[in-house]
Amino acid sequence: MMKTFNLKYIGLFIAAAAIVSCDIEFEEPIDEAGAFTPGEADFSNYVSVGNSLTSGFADNALYLDAQLQSFPAIIAGQMEFAGGGEFIQPLVNDNAGGLLAGGVQILPNRFVLASDGMGTPAGPAVYTGQAPTTDITNTVTGKLNNYGVPGAKSFHLGAPGYGNIAGVATGQANPYYVRFATAGTSTVIADAAAANPTFFTLWIGNNDVLSYATSGGLGVDQTGNLNPATYGSNDITDPNVFASVVSGYVTALTANGAKGALINIADVTSIPFFTTVPSNAIPLDAATAGAVMSNPQIQQYNGGLQLAAGGGLITPAEAALRTISFVAGQNFMLMEDEDLTDLSGLGLPNLRQTNDTDLITFTSATVIGTTVGGNPQLIRGVSVPLEDQNVLTATEQAAINAAQGAYNATLEALAAANGLALVDAKTALATVANGGVSINGGVLTSTYASGGAFSLDAVHPTPRGYAFTANAIIDAINAQYGSTVPKVDVATYRSIQTSDAVN
Amino acid sequence: MNKLKALAVLLLISSMAYAGGYRVSTQSNRQLAMGHTGVAVVNNADILFFNPAGIVHLENKLNFSAGGFGVISSVKYQNSEFGTSSETESPTGTPVYAYGTYKINEKLAVGLGIYTPFGSNVTWDTNWAGSHLVNEIDLSAIFIQPTVAYKLFDSVSIGGGPIIAIGGVSFNRNAGRSLTNEQGERSNVAIEDSGVLAYGWTAGLMFTPNDRFAFGFNYRSLINIESTEGTATFSNFPNSSLTPDNGDTGFTATLPLPAEITVGLSHKFFNDKLLLAFDYNRALWSEYESLDLVFENGSTSINPRNYKDSSTWRLGAQYTATDKLILRAGYYFDESPVQSGFFAPETPRNDSNGYTFGFTYQVNSKLAVDASFLYLRFKEIDESYDFFTDPGASSPSTFGGTYKSQALIPGIGVTYSM
């Protein structure tokens, strides 16, 4: 009898255990269907199309870790909460970055932030901790979702042969697209459309002005030239060409009724490539400045300018602009400017000093203040002018801004006409550049290396910068389609990578 | 992170955290079944833990009691802003106890207790959203308590003894929210120590003005587990002088096991068939201000905790149904020592309600089997830990979301008296 009683209690124990050991349930569980919704959109097959920014390119290379944190991969991960499907990228092999063609390296490894070995950052350096293994002769086949091709300009996406390995050596083809082109004659946009997206993002046009900008305006503003086949690699794409091709891409991507987002083009002044090196980067003490100014060539040049102005060949303003002056303290740099009035008839070169309106390219940092041939009298930026490629002048910036403004107007119109979300990356990145954006545990700025948003190539975002971009895109998508795709905690994505595995 | 220390090889059974912080109130099957009251309840040798003054009130000359529990617990986390979620995978913990007392004469008794009042065992998914705070933690402490009790007067006894604590810890977490090596693998720090010895004491008083009423008071001292001999393992840090080197290094850390004050009373009714008990505990958790890990490689990890003193209110009832069967039930409300903004997922405890019941089956005049069951219920809570600063970051970040926990603790033990 007592035994029975005992058994009853044991039974009660077990019953109670069964009841309470059931899964814990939240009042509003987020892993339940309907917790996040796609609204009018269908995220089941998201396809991203674009250039390096879409591919996840960072630190001057395409490498695995950053690729896995590309903005489309981040967005796709969040879309999974609202009906999103698998997202397949043409992943490279390793974290060295760099590309091989038939075993020969054709593109360099990624940058890492090296230190002096004593705990102080030294600067960017090419990572050598690992040999590159991604060979473009090993192509990726099968379903893909990310059609981001580093280096692509707007018209490249529709160019047959852009993925033909035979054209890589001549610059007619893009080695990144070679890796996953469906055929030697395929186009990026046709491949992407064939992936049959239910949702897409298209971010293209950055390189249509950026290559001109990063070359310091070496290229030509091709506005008015409607034949991109004649363009050089550093040229600005004609806005009508841009409008024509991008309109075609939107048509192709929406052919099956896909929704999507168009992302506009940010200002070049939003990237550290143009904001890191100041235009007055030359410090001089009084004695050195005096020695420089005593150079007879400078005196002759300054004197010649006054004569030219007096003779009406140039305005007094231009004479003032061109007059060379080095003083104690920070000095603007001597440079060549092809947009100045040609005074070679007077034996006067096209020289002036940089000023506040000039943007100095990031890569000039390694040149400024160095000597030519070891001659201490020949110092770049002081006695030897900086070259065109070192400086993006106000005139060149104006050409960029005009084209960029036209591209963005086109994107806005296309988004409106097709019921697509428009992502204002220009404003978002300008906010990062101007004071920064507060994130969980700090501030995201565009300051080189330490700001968090930009990778060590000074042009492309870090994974953290891409996460910020992804949130901006998610916001625009949610606003356009009434979806509730959750954003990401930007600060949990990494910024630059440190490593002393460098040469 | 915590640091406790490590230890105990054989005995060491990991325990789990229930009751605020990492205090685990499972020191008796009989008393747990009564809401873990006991400072004024003379049932068996378990009184040695609840109130050392009580052992002199045990009727028999020799009393033994031993038992254990299976702790089945889990914690769920989700963040609806970012869509992140995780759930602990908690191995079953098994806190144990064993007590023995010997009455030398009517006024003097001695005893020895071994029990595991502190512990925590929480395993989240590796690299989950809060992995910069904890991936996995296993704290344990075994207490050994020699005890003596003396009857000052017929109605007043006192008792106490030293406590030898043996602590152990293993703890693993990522070094930051985004720090990785060149391969994108999360940089990680794991610490481990065991067999750390520390000492404290306990003292109690029991007042029994008549056969039906008892009043008890017990104080248990603070014990600081100071870990100095353990190993910290740094892994997946980049090959850079800007970050710590990979490999093993030493560390120091101190984890306080807080002092605790208990007062309570019991009263018998209905021909002594029914006993009601009430206990009030005050745990002096405010000692736990910060968990500071100092590594020999020069790095540190400062983790503000800022715990507050917290209270537990316990009610218990015991009904002698037959000569052979005693039934028990109880309830307690356990206030969490964790303050808002300091809610770290290594001890994700908010206030909880404990519902208990159990019974004793008297096998013969000497031997009894004790069983108990605790269902510990936590309300869903939105909380965060706001004091983690990433390496190199200028300001702390917050990690928060919605947490929900529960624990289910069945226990079994034996009592032997002669």
Image: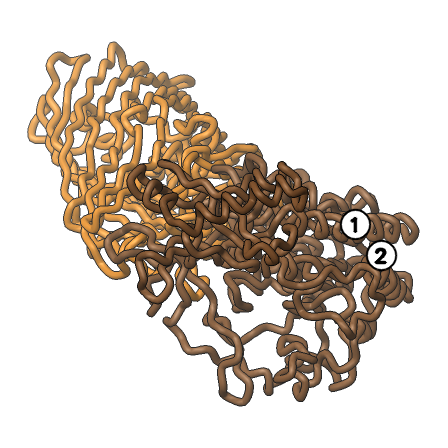
Chain colours: A brown, B orange
- Residue B105 as seen in the image, left or right of residue A494: left
Q: Are marks 2 and 1 in contact (CB under 8 Å)?
A: no
The C terminus of chain A is located in which quarter?
A: bottom left
The residue positioned 41% from the left and 34% from the top of the image is B387
Between B229 and B312, which is closer to the camera in this rendering?
Answer: B229
Which one is closest to the eye, mark 2 or mark 1? 1
First of labels 2, 1 by sequence position: 2
Which numbered dot is residue A239?
A: none
Are labels 2 and 1 on one chain?
Answer: yes
In this view of the protein, can residue B305 be seen by the observer?
yes
**Residue A357 drawn above or below residue A175:** above
Residue holding disc 2: A259
Residue B154 pos. (x, y %): 15, 13
Q: Secondary structure at mark 1?
A: helix
Is the residue B381 above or below the residue A368 in the image?
A: above
Q: Nearer the viewer, residue B244 or A251?
A: A251
Could you tell whether A116 is left or right of B106 in the image? Answer: right
- Please state the horizontal and vertical placement of residue B319, each as a whole percent of the image: 43, 28
Query: Residue A408 has which mark?
Result: 1
Displayed quadrant of residue B324: top left
User: x and y percent of residue A477 in the render?
Assistant: 77, 48
| Residue A21 in sight here | no
Mark 1 Cα-neighbour bin, 10 Å: few <14, some 14–19, many ≥20: many
Distance from Cα at disc 2 to Cα at disc 1: 19 Å
